[in-house]
Image (cartoon, rainbow, N blue to C red):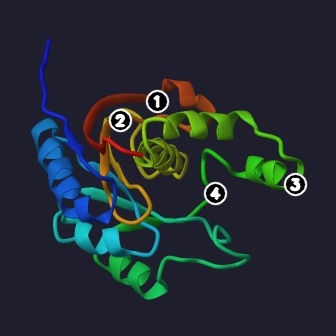
Amino acid sequence: MEEKKIVYFTEPGEKNTVHTLNLAKQRADELGIKDIIIATTRGGTAREAIKIFDAKEYNVIFVTHMAGFRGIGMQEFPDDLKKELISKGYKVLTCMHALSGVERAYRKKYGYLGPAEIMAITLRLFGEGTKVCVEIVLMAADAGLISMENDVIAIAGTGIGADTAFVIKPAHTSNVFDLTVREIICKPRKR
């Protein structure tokens, strides 16, 4: 048996970003985890994360919203920040969301919920960041940016910023039920 501390934030949101990133780094160092996957929409979390996670020491993957998430052809993540991050050795992943994708089109047009969106809704019972942590690990795995052999740290949030971090055994979306949430590092108590 092993006992570990879990941090539960009183409120969700951006104010927890730096604390979440520091908790995640501490646990990554304790476990020797080098793959760090971080959700970032407009770049604020990425800007904070690069102060904590050095690209020379960690394989840091920033996962953005897919193009078109907020509007046709629109990309929320700033292109200049993407170029800066890549030049410093970080990775930026923009692709279809693993837990919606084509199913979102069916929901919008016909009101039909598919299995992936049902999974997303279920994960949101534990908080928005929980769903996003699972999703970004699947996306990074499918993009070939992480090893399937090693645990990763996933960091996400509720709306803006980061307030959730997990240790996860990754899997590809085609093997989603092999993914395992091994540890909760932190999450908000409220949704």
Precedes in sequence: disc 3 or disc 4: 4
Q: Which residue is mark 4?
A: 96
CB within 8 Å, label 1 to label 4: no
The image shows residue 99 at horizontal and vertical percentages of 61, 44
Residue 109 bears which disc, if any?
3
Mark whose residue sits in front, 3 or 4: 3
Judge left or right: residue 47 versus residue 160.
Answer: left
Residue 168 bears which disc, if any?
2
Mark whose residue sits in front, 3 or 2: 3
Precedes in sequence: disc 4 or disc 2: 4
Judge left or right: residue 41 versus residue 51.
Answer: right
Q: Which residue is mark 1?
A: 179
Query: Which quadrant would residue 59 be assigned to in this image?
Result: bottom left
Classed neighbour count for the residue bearing mark 3: other residues with Cα under 10 Å, few (<14), some (14–19), many (≥20)? few
Q: Callout 2: helix, strand or loop? A: strand
**Residue drawn at x 41%, y 48% as measured from the top left:** 129
Mark whose residue sits in front, 1 or 3: 3
Say above or below: 189 vs 136: above
CA separation in Å, label 3 and label 2 = 34 Å
CB within 8 Å, label 1 to label 3: no
Q: Residue furthest top?
A: 1
The image shows residue 3 at horizontal and vertical percentages of 12, 21
